[in-house]
Amino acid sequence: MTETRGLKLNAITVLGGAIGVLSASLPWLLFRPNRLVQGDALAVWQLSGPWHWLALVAWALIGLSGLWRSSLRGYVGTALLVGAIAAIALTISSNAALLLSGAGEFARVSVSGGVWLMLLAIYIAAFGVGTEMKFAAPMVLLALLATFVLGAYSRLGPAVEYAAVSDTFFTELLRHFALSIAAVIVAVVIGVPLALLAVRNSRLEGLVLGGAGLLQTIPSLALFGVLLAPLAWVGRSVSVGAVLAIIVIGALLSFAISRLPVSGLSGVLPVRFALVGVTALVALPMLAVLIYNALIGNLGGLAAFVQPAALLSSAGIRGIGAAPALVALTIYALLPIVVNTFVGMKSVPEGVIDAAKGMGMNQRQVFLRAELPIAIPAMLTGLRGATVLSFGLTTVAALIGGGGLGFFILRGVDANAPDLILVGAAPIVILALVIDALLRALSAVVTPKGLR
Amino acid sequence: MTLARAALLPVLWVAAFALFAWQDGWRLALTALFPNSRNPVFERATLLELVGQHLAIAGLASVLVLIVGLPLAVWATRPSGRPFLPLIANTVSIGQTFPPTAVLFLMLPILGFGAQAAVLALFLYGLLPTVSGALQGLETVPADALEAGIGSGMSERQRLLRLELPLALPSLLAGVRTTLILVMATTTIAPLVGTGGLGVPIIGGLGNDNLAQVLQGALPVAMLALLTDYSMRTLERRLTPWRS
Amino acid sequence: MIEFIGVSKSYNAGTVILNDISLTVERGELVILIGPSGCGKSTLLRLVNRMIAPSSGQILIGGKDSALLDPVELRRGIGYVIQSIGLFPHMTIFENVEVVPSILGTQKAERRSRAESLLHTVGLEPGVYGSRYPRALSGGQQQRVGIARALAADPDVMLMDEPFSAVDPITRGGLQDEFLRIKTEINKTIVFVTHDIDEAIKIGDRVCVLNAGAVQQFDTPEALLRAPANDFVASFLGEDRELKRLSLMPVTALMRIPPSNAGEARGQVLASSSARDALSQLMGASGRELNVMDVAGNVIGLIAMSDYGRNP
């Protein structure tokens, strides 16, 4: 038998290096005298300065390091990768400065296919090197962040576009967050009780889980569209006081039914359920808009809710704007919340509940002390899914006048300015990843130690 | 009874297309619903044409996903592709955190405007759930069944075709279903990057406050999505009778 | 016939699993491999169908060096039954049993009739179970299917890796009885791994006791119980090994041929009983002797406590 000596080749690092070298076959930068013309794509050999050649050499060496059977290759690979990032950043900043000097104020330089391909190569190579050197990925992230902070890309098109809209950027960012968070809050308020109901009542199980799944299937833009007309009508014809009255009556009736001596009868639960459902449906847009207004600090919008005679439209519930977006986002956020709460509660072993009852806990204590801690990891998974989902879907809200980062995307599309589109799209993707990572960390902290 | 159930799916699809083709019906209904609207019906193309465009874009992207994604997942779980499995698995899991709409637009500066670019973007994003589902299915084939398969003298190819792929089907098909729904939904937004489809009347209608046209696009998209979902679930049940 | 010639197996880290094993399993014989966990018994079994390769040594199957055979072809000629059963969940019971014949290209009708007769052999009604999926069967029923599947291609050799240890004790007893019956019908060379000494004694023609990768003793159950080769084997067999040996011995081996007073009223024991069962009855009965009866009801002998002293 032959004995394999040392390490195997690191195929992923080799692939990363190869893609990095291959990026030379695509243009790296794009120069346009103004927004409207197609512009010139600049291939590698058309660039000036030594840095782009150094970047390519670094890529070649990274690829070769994957073939080098030495335990040092993890460190060497990481160093080369950081070097490549620095070289690319220097290529971009020096060439952008050169191209823009004396080119007029409407001239734009953007990165092109080759640089995007190198971004892919950085990810793959960092992954490959990361299997051998634990700190490779953090180092690469740090290097990327450093080039960003040091202003290597500050002359590029997206940065210029951002500077032009920086006064509204944070308003839209806040709206984006407010829309998605308000939707998640309402989804939790509605979804968790629904899931608990489904856990306790197997007849409702199919209805609740199936219903949430069905709604999730409908494309977001279609749901936004379908909601427009009814919400517009409701806004025009229903007053704030009427909704408040329905909510109060619904709550009272529901409470009254629960106190009826016939509560054991099978017919009562569906009636009560339907009542709660109708009330929740009426309350949903109002609750969501209320939370949204509170989150963005829109006091005028809040004030409308204490004027019973005012129409709902004056409180912001209209066909266009935040209301349909909030309703649709809430509906999408429901499924992850409901399903994961359900799964979490179902995953509580029968024995645990039995034991908890056996030691004399009442229903409330069983729930809080035994069931909830066990169900919490799954519920947090649902919360994470709902938040990331609704943060992404909020992009579409701009189409119905709801605002958010999608606003810049639409303006970019209208103005045929890909750079402006990036100003909207890139933060959405990056923030979605950050939110996902933060909520993962949170759920790791909250999960009881015994369940980790 | 079973015959009626078997016929339900084709009947639903035929009914849906009959409804899409009934242009006058839509005109009547939308005019009645929105008496104040001047153009309650999208006129530049018939609804059936819009549905056709929509399905062509979404269908092309989905077919590409199947052609590329399934072999990719199989290769990543064979000895030759195994070194790349962690990379592929990690990529599809991170990638699915990306909001599909944002990805569509993020691709725009890279791929450019137009139908081809849109199909490419939809294809790239659509790969994620299919590859993820297929990988999950192939990686969770029961070890005892595999052991018994090897012990019975199945060749690698026979194990793949007779054991691993059939046993991966539940997960794999669920992934494909997610891809189809996602691609179908995201295609609705694709007119913004320069394609046709049912998103055209929706986005146009939103732009000039024409709720009738919004509805004319939104209802068929919702119907198509629900029908696709239902069809895939039926297919999943048919192909995996051993599960229930 | 299976011959292990100087077989060793070790892993890279230097862990030795099997150390220079040589033993021969005769044609048509059922050999039990037994020992504590980690003794290498499963490894030894899995070397036969090349699920793993030996580090050194040779394994001859029917006189041919198994290392020179194509592993896939080799396995098709060897039935393989494992503890976790490993029925293919997506195939019906019929399809499960027909897997190997279908790989080998046997005609559908022939496959099906073979599967039906095999299901009969393992005690499952094909009309009832054939079209079901594995999840609809109990553990014991699943393992019957596992055995039928291993027999489907009519292999000369069967390998069974703790096939009955995942089922409950009562089902296990039933499966063992059934298996003893099947064994006489099929006449295969069988290597059978177990950790249950009672199972080994009950069904093995010969038992190979392994410890720390080496053969401690390889002999018939009776010989093993009568004369354990070393302290390890003795303690592995247990303090009650004499009782175990009695369970292998028919009562007729110990009884005395009765004198004329045969008709005297005594307790009775059937001639087909084991010496151990007769002992149990003697201890329970108040009388000091039992009549040994044949099936026709004739007294053919007498047995008393004192007869156990002449233990052969």
Image (spheres, coloured by chain):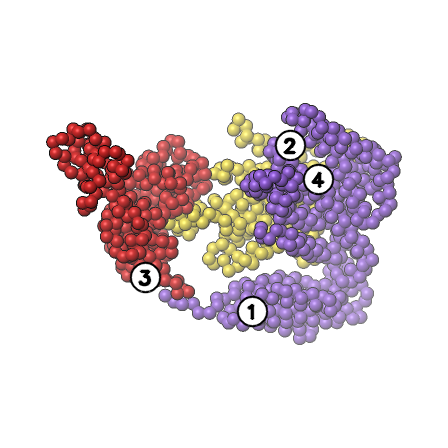
Residue C107 seen anywhere in this rendered image of the structure: no
- What is the drawing colour of chain A? purple
Helix, strand or loop at disc 4? helix
Three-letter residue code for mark 2: Ala
**Residue tagged 4:** A190
Residue A39 seen anywhere in this rendered image of the structure: yes
State whether discs 4 and 1 lie on one chain. Answer: yes
Numbered circle sitting on residue A74:
1
**Cα separation between marks 3 and 2:** 76 Å
**Cα separation between marks 2 and 1:** 62 Å
- Residue at position x 14%, y 36% in the image: C257
Helix, strand or loop at disc 2? helix
Which of the two discs, 4 and 1, labels the residue nearer the N terminus? 1
**Residue tagged 3:** C19
Three-letter residue code for mark 3: Asn
**Cα separation between marks 4 and 1:** 50 Å
Point out the image quarter for the N terminus of chain A. bottom left
Please report, as a chain letter, where disc 3 is located.
Answer: C
- What is the drawing colour of chain C? red
**Cα separation between marks 4 and 2:** 38 Å
Three-letter residue code for mark 1: Gly
Three-letter residue code for mark 4: Ile
Q: Are marks 3 and 2 in contact (CB under 8 Å)?
A: no
**Residue tagged 2:** B18
Numbered circle sitting on residue C39:
none
- What is the drawing colour of chain B? yellow
